[in-house]
Image: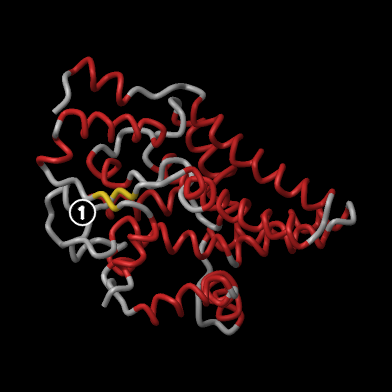
Amino acid sequence: MFGETEWQALSARQPWRGVLLVAHAWLVIGLAAALAIAVPNVLTITLAVLVIGSRQLGLAILMHDAAHGMLATRTRRNDLLGQWFCAVPTGIDLAEYRQYHLRHHAYAQQDEDPDLVLSAPFPVTRASLTRKVLRDLTGLTFLKLRVLPFVLALFGRYRLRRSDYLLLGFNVALALVAWSVGLLWAYALLWLAPAATWNMLVTRIRNIAEHACMTNDPDPWRVARTTQANWLARALIAPYYVNYHAEHHLFMSVPCYRLPAIHRALVASGDAASNALPVTPGYAAMLQEAGSA
């Protein structure tokens, strides 16, 4: 498929590229929040919710790279960045996720795939998909996934995981810092609200786009989908190259920032066409397929 020299260039990790991507995610979050705090109105706060919610997904995507050891060239730096700067703020524990996620790669779209529950129900009806979107945007999904476990734990009906405690600790600390400087409202509107609404939706869209409506064929060319994304989709729906998911499953040892080059190389070589690499022309087309039952 690729010659040795070409593969070395396509798969090479840059020592500080992952660090810069993490810094970029937090910088975008900070700038969006700063604008909304400096000029608080419906427009700036709505824009901040969209931008911050998408970057919260971005942190989860970068954590995913860390789970593959691709966020930094040194293991200690990779795990430090992945756990404390990406995983914990998004309610994930890197070690727990890594164990779970590598099983997904080993058994993608098979009965043993722990992520099959995310893709197996699709396609659904348009009405069902609409209800899912509304639950995400109104915070109901967030209440179910992030709040209900703590309520159930109070009654002994759920055992909290390490990721639950870490997420609670992060949010308590962030709320206390915001309260100490008189900006508790900013924590509620500019971190909690994006996490409870837009982040829930774009996380669902990501999950649908990656594997929904795919066959259970174990052929690695058939288990995942790539979705074309314009600049707006990359800004608000698919940050940090997450749309190149077919390429990621083919070459999971490649860092996310190399996936566009992998895609271009597969197209140029003819491998994408000859193997019928699943590519959907945009998220609107993908959602139309997912809601076509």
Q: Which quadrant, please, contains the C terminus?
A: bottom left
Q: Nearer the viewer, residue 58 or 225?
A: 225
Number of numbered markers: 1
Looking at this view, name the residue that lies furthest to the bottom.
155
The residue type indicated by label 1 comes to Val
In the image, what residue occupies the spot 12% across and 50% down?
A: 219
Looking at this view, name the residue that lies furthest to the top.
5
The quarter of the displayed image where residue 130 is located: bottom left
Q: Position of residue 246 (x, y in %)?
A: 26, 46
Q: Secondary structure at mark 1?
A: loop
In the image, what residue occupies the spot 44% across and 49% down?
A: 95
Q: Which quadrant, please, contains the N terminus?
A: top left
Q: Residues within 10 Å of mark 1 (few under 14, many from 20)?
A: many
Q: Nearer the viewer, residue 56 or 132?
A: 132
The quarter of the displayed image where residue 11 is located: top left
Q: Position of residue 235 (x, y in %)?
A: 53, 46
Q: Position of residue 139 (x, y in %)?
A: 59, 73
Q: Position of residue 58 (x, y in %)?
A: 52, 47
In the image, what residue occupies the spot 53% across and 49% down?
A: 87
Q: Nearer the viewer, residue 13 or 259?
A: 259
> Which residue corresponds to mark 1?
223
Question: Would residue 257 appear left or right of 175 to someone viewing this image?
Answer: left
In the image, what residue occupies the spot 35% across and 47% down?
A: 228
Instruction: Give the answer, above or below, for where 189 lies relative to 144.
Output: above
Instruction: Give the answer, above or below, for where 193 lies relative to 13.
Output: below
